[in-house]
Amino acid sequence: MKKITIPIGPQHPALKEPISLRMTIEGEVVKDADVRLGYNHRGLEKLAENKTYIQNIYLMERICGICSHSHTTCYVQAVEKLCGLEVPRRGLYIRMLVCELERIHSHLLWLGVAAHEAGFDSLFMYTWRDREVVMDLLEIISGNRVHYAINTIGGVRRDVNENQKEKILEGIKFLKMRTEYYTNLGTTEPTFVVRITKVGMLPKEKAIALCAVGPTLRASGVASDIRKDDPYAAYSEIPFELCTANTCDVLGRVVVRVKELVESYKIVEYIINNLPQGDIKVRAPRKVQPAEVVSRYEAPRGENIHYVKSNGTDKPERLKVRAPTLANYPATIEMLKNCFVADIPLIFAAIDPCVCCAERFVELKDIRKGTSKVLSMADIRRKYKYNEIKKDFVWPL
Amino acid sequence: MNQQELIERIKTELGDKIVEISSPAERRVFLTVTGENLVDTVKKLRDSFDFYHLSTITGMDTLSSFEILYHLANKLCCLTVRVSIDRNNPEIMTICDVIPGAILYEREIQDLLGIVVKNIPDPRPLVLPDDWEKGNYPLRKDWNYQAPEEKIPGENK
């Protein structure tokens, strides 16, 4: 049979973010897959070299709209190590509280997307409705639903009071009940289980060789979690289970994430009930002595790693960010091989891809002049507005 | 095995390949080797010390040379292998034969720093456009863009 290459993306109804997947298919079977990145590259690493350590917190927060707290935590704990700061325990606990609430909201979001891709839209509606509960809790704590802006170098910016604690426990109680319902529903609804079983197989050896991370790796039977392997904040004090599955397919990834939801509820309850007293932050110096630090963090999607090198000024010499999705792409290509065309969105969604995390640049190229430049959003707006006026454009309304 | 024992064992196993080894913090080890010994070192670390996981590769321009940092991890610690290469002749061997998951990171340093990764299985650009001008490497410290002068319509000057 003749092999045909079909492009999926960069703009495609099945993808929520711009990425180009090129599939070589033979009939209905995918024989080879290729991924082309760069449609969302924003130049954050270069930009970070021109901003101060405090300004970079805001930049890191905006790498991603879902795991925004992951990137800031990873970054601030690197800078805290560079400065030799000891963060107060209450600060660390509040940081972990937001971490876990973020994990809950990300996993609920993902569960909905996976259900949607599998054609189970009622579950999608349910999980996204329940996700609002945790979004509201995050708003109660930080004042924001998406970019919580709770981290600062040396601790956190907002404290948690008794009233908020009560509301969090109430919300978690509700979510626990709902998750139990999803667990029953997801494991007993035969159409859903059959749809995701043996889809997107990733054997254990391949997962290790291709350096997969997070739930993708754990669903292939590898017990690896940065919270256990390389405990940051105060995770060494918190009792929780590492969740794995050994089915190596999309079902395994669902199971791992649902189990992690339950563990996260327990962690949140533990944090609220054992919140230490004291300060929430210490003062940080503006300039940082020359040094280098590797900081690792278990984001909802897997291992997030930042490398920060300082040079004695108030700006970093180099800031390297590697988000979990980039690490999972080689494994995704492996999963897509020999699958059916209809499984592509499901398999791709199963790694919980976050394209904007994996890429950090935007460069615009002027084809007519043959020049290229890094533009800010304000520049783009201005340019666009200018062209619009120049052409005397009238909206066809 | 604790971290100190690990460092001692690495010292005996790798011998004179090590230029420098240090442990600035708990669960963090920095190891410097020369470019020629990189692949052998990574292979040895993988086979004898279970460093199967490559977290990422950081490329860095120090103006006198390029530094490439391979962040490896096992259950015990995160080990960074540092390699310095000549800035005028930036070449390094691929480690994809040892760790296949390194491919995207090697393509990224090729794109952004202009380091030539020899024997790389897939040399296409990763993040920069296909028609990106040759010789423009954004993460090099001497790469600069002069922002064009702002023209705000309606403002007469």
Image: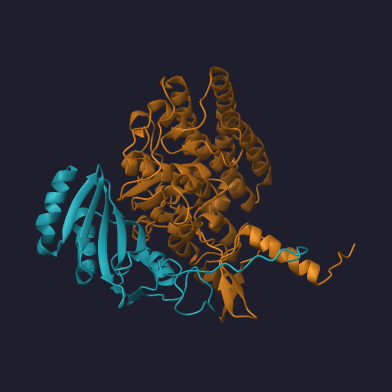
Look at 65% across and 51% down and name the residue there: A119
**Residue in view at x 15 percent, y 55 percent:** B10
Residue drawn where x is 31% and y is 64% of the image: B68
Q: Determine whether A345 is above or below A279 in the image.
A: below
Question: Of A99 and A245, which appears nearest the observer?
Answer: A99
- Total marks shown come to 0
The quarter in which the N terminus of chain A is drawn is bottom right
Question: Residue A225's image quarter?
Answer: top left
The colour chain B appears in is cyan
Residue A107 percent across, percent down from the top left: 54, 42
Image location (x, y in percent) of residue A201: 46, 58
Name chain A's colour. orange
Is the residue A270 above or below the residue A10 in the image?
above
Q: Is residue B127 visible?
A: yes
Would residue A135 be found to the left or right of residue B67 on screen? right
Q: Position of residue B143 (x, y in %)?
A: 44, 70
